[in-house]
Amino acid sequence: MDGSLEVDPQVDIENHGNAGNSKIEDGPCSKNDVPEVIVETKQDGAELTAPEIDEKQTNERTLISVQKVRQSLSNLNRTADGLTCAYLNLIINNTDMKSAALLKGYIHVQKLDLKNNMLEETSDLGNMRHLTELDLSQNRLQEALSIFPEPSNLRKAVLTANQIERVRDLSGFMRLSTLVMDDNSIRKMEGISGLQFLTVLSMKKNLLSSCSGLEELRMLRELYLDENRICSLKPLAVVTSLEVLTTAKNRLKDLAGVQTLQRLRKLDVSSNQIPTLEDIHHARSAAFLDELCILGNPLEQVLHFRLHTVHLLPQVTTLDQQRVGEKEKVLAANLHGADAEDLRAIRKKWFPNGELDDGGGAILPTSAGMVASDGSDSCCEGPPYLQQDFEQVLAQANREAHSDGISGLAKFLSKGCSDHLTLCMRVWSWVARHVNPPDQTWQVGTPVFLAEHNYLEELVSGVSGMWSERVTWLFREILHCCDVPVVLISGYCKTENIWPGERRAAHNHCWSAVQINKRWRLLDIAWAAQRRGHAPFYISPEVFINRCFPLEAHWQLLQEPIGLEEFWKLPMCSIMFLQSGLALVDPTLTDVVTLEKGREGGPTPTLMLQISAPHRFRLRHKLLDADHIHIEQSEQPMLFAKTSEDDSRTLHELWTAFPSYGTFFIVVEMEEDVPVAVRLRIHETQDEIPLNIYESQEVDVFRLKVVVPPPEPLDPARPLPASPFTRIAFQESSPTVIALGCKLAQLVEERAPLKEA
């Protein structure tokens, strides 16, 4: 060889002057990848059918020929081996080409663009062993990259807008780094697990129902799965190399699986079915997440949605295509009480006696003059007012609300009210009886009112937010029309479906504070609605904090506010538990108890719970497993109870023996005999005899999570401790001992060793 260049004799270079220099788009998500949708019509204006459109496009296409192929060559340059010159680019668009037979001889082509043809098979492209970029979009292919032998140097393949239903094994394309298969009919991610160097994968507009199948792609950086049917991102949890993930217009309900994607920089989950802020908290672990788009999800209806999202995901700098400014970050932090400690210190120093009262609606902490109601002004509450033709009052109020809106409703309910307390009770009762609470009060998009009162939905039209936010807003607006000060409070709530040991990353509830007689009451109208109005109107702040924690600490109305983690660690006592006078004997008890490690062959771990209660209440407890399923009593009893009484209260000792190690839940039920008015009439004498009949009502009032650790190995040098049941002093005449009989003695003597869960 003398180093001179030779032109490949297979390539005709005479007619290359008309060849274009177009190039394939670099990004898989370029607008050029998405064909423009044009509605074809006839001369009479009627739309063309699919066969007619196909025939028209065929007639408009250029006939493929050898001359056409030669004119489409461009980029004369050195071949891959550097020994000769050849045309490296070939672009053939909008022709009637159905196969690649005419392209067999062009073995040196590296970039091949065959968009918008009529290709049905591509096996003849196997001769192009130096191919690096291939665009086969807008053809009629039914299988992905059916090329034999596979070009081992292929780096990028675009197969957009074909008829592909399945993907064969593509492991032969060992160097493929970008694969675009948008707008096809692919139902399953298969055949791509062997692409170890794949960094960009786009499968938009397909029929995918799952994103599993990518577990082996350790170098995948960008994944585009928009407009599919995907319901979960959990299969992507192992694809930790992802930096860009777009799954817009799918069926996602949460972001579970994103928490392990530490390198993620951009996430687009817009137009899905994500209902609450809690469902996006998984993204908090993605420390480098810079750009997030969540528009078009139900959660954007939450009150102050953007500020809450900024607080929940502080690492995000671009939210819904808008830059997050410094002002927004400050507002988001203050909305969650970030300034509470500083304000409390300032006001405590300069206004120690609560002199500050500007009367301008400012939200002030306890030290600045906010005084909580002690319930002493509630003597007018109760049956006397509520039983006086109240149903007729409610019916008339509905008519006023339907005709004159909130102002008319407020005006009617205020008639005859001598004070704000009576008025507030009327509004409380009207709202609680007419709204329709869902299973979870933080849901969005659900109707506010009962079906029979759906004509009242116009009262809250245009008001977005969680169900509890919309109901509380309605309660506030009615009272505002009557000049009663009311403030909406957002925060965390221990609802019935939250168990001990669980936490919420985002707030899930809304309630209100009402100022009556210059004192503030905390009122949870959403909770009252769940109980159809049968809820206490006055709850002290000390009791209220066991269920609801406000984002702004001063709305605890406590002299010494507690922190969020301290709130979650409080024992899970219901409002009824505390309002009924029940109390835990152990003041240090938290929501989760971890027992000491037992020893193999030793006694079963046990726990004794002490609760003090008035005489009229009876308590019993049950044991649930980690999945909240009730564990039935076996031949070997696990639950025992002992009571002792004094003049006014009963001390309940609730003992639990755990069948194995693991996680358990203890649920305490309160049983109360409620008097029922019954009169017995004797037919012969027509006399009526009053009967003292009581109806038993049971309700869960306390929950406790218990963790029983695995036992330690048996050490012969250390003697086993005795069972704690041998030290229980039961009264011989107590109902407990009579009910248990000899089973208790059998338990003490023959307690089985600890079993594995």
Image (cartoon, rainbow, N blue to C red):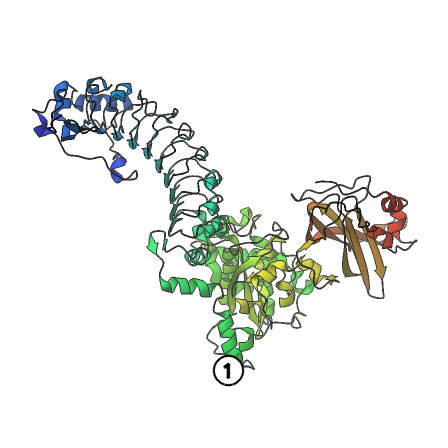
Quadrant containing the N terminus in the rendered view: top left
Q: Position of residue 269 (x, y in %)?
A: 40, 45
Asked which quadrant contains residue 659, the reply is: top right
Question: Is 23 on the left or on the right of 263, as rendered?
Answer: left
**Spot occupied by residue 603 in the image (x, y as percentages of width and height):** 80, 47
Question: Is residue 512 something that shows in the picture?
Answer: yes
* Residue under numbered circle 1: 350
Can you see residue 679? no
- For the residue labelled by badge 1, is the local secondary structure a helix, a strand or a loop? helix
Q: Position of residue 554 (x, y in %)?
A: 54, 69
Q: Nearer the viewer, residue 145 or 447?
A: 145
Other residues around mark 1 within 10 Å, as few (<14) / some (14–19) / many (≥20): few
Residue placed furthest toward the top? 101
In the image, taking residue 719 as reference, residue 535 lies left or right, namely: left
- On-image quarter of the C terminus: top right
Residue 302 at x, y = what percent? 46, 54
Q: Quadrant of residue 539?
A: bottom right
Q: Residue 594 vs residue 351: left or right?
A: right
Report the side of 649 relative to 97 (left or right).
right
Q: Nearer the viewer, residue 374 or 336?
A: 336
2 in relation to 217, above or below: above
Q: How many marks?
A: 1
User: What residue type is disc 1 on?
Assistant: Trp
Q: Nearer the viewer, residue 187 or 9?
A: 9
Q: Residue at x 48, y 43 (%)?
A: 257
- Above or below 549: residue 241: above
**In this view, which residue lies farthest toward the front?**
2
Q: Residue at x 26, y 21 (%)?
A: 125
